[in-house]
Amino acid sequence: MLERVVSICQQYQRRVQVPRPFCCRRIAGRPGAPIFKPIGIPVRALDEVVMTLDEFEAMRLADLDGLYQEQAAEQMNVSRPTLSRIIDSAHRKMADALVHGKALRIGGGPVQMEGRRCCRIHDDEAK
């Protein structure tokens, strides 16, 4: 009898272990320039690192705007631990591009656009 209960529990666990659906993350807008690269080297000759738009937005809010992670997470509609993982990933990608001389492309990811662009400077240019 005990073996049957264990077997049923194992079957239930296998069925239940599906990944959670991905939530869209709110971002203010796209960056002013979608790609950054070392001067004098064509993009096609470089390795490329891709930073998603949510990683870009997390860095903008936390590093540029100086928001606490709790505030930034609330603006992006994610939890604070998720925001921390997003920022860690963005920092790692940026460091890889800078240290190894790779192109950094910004785009993609599960995002929902808000009305403005990436910062106050580009907001003024859009008007």
Image (cartoon, rainbow, N blue to C red):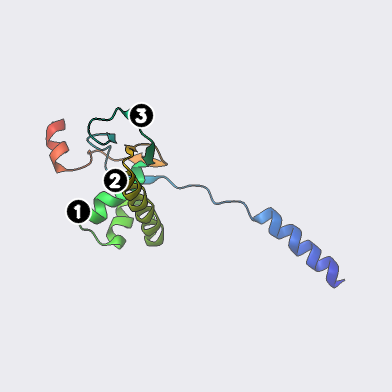
Q: Quadrant of residue 101?
A: top left
Q: Is residue 114 above or below residue 17?
A: above
Q: Quadrant of residue 1?
A: bottom right
Residue located 16% across and 31% down the image: 126
Q: Is residue 126 above or below residue 80?
A: above
Kind of residue at badge 1: Asp
**Mark 2 crowdedness (10 Å alpha carbons): few <14, some 14-19, many ≥20:** some
Q: SS class of the residue under badge 1?
A: loop
Q: SS class of the residue under badge 2?
A: helix
Q: Mark number for residue 38?
A: none
Residue located 38% across and 36% down the image: 47
Name the residue that disc number 3 marks. 45
Classify the position of the C terminus by image quarter.
Answer: top left
Name the residue that disc number 2 marks. 98
CB-based contact (under 8 Å), mark 2 and mark 1: no
Inter-mark Cα distance, 2 to 1: 22 Å
- N-terminal of the pair, mark 2 or mark 1, is 1
**Mark 3 crowdedness (10 Å alpha carbons): few <14, some 14-19, many ≥20:** few
In the depicted view, which residue is nearer to us: 127 or 102? 102
| Side of 41 relative to 77 (left or right) | left
Kind of residue at badge 2: Leu
**Farthest-out residue, right:** 1
- N-terminal of the pair, mark 2 or mark 3, is 3
- N-terminal of the pair, mark 1 or mark 3, is 3
Name the residue that disc number 1 marks. 65
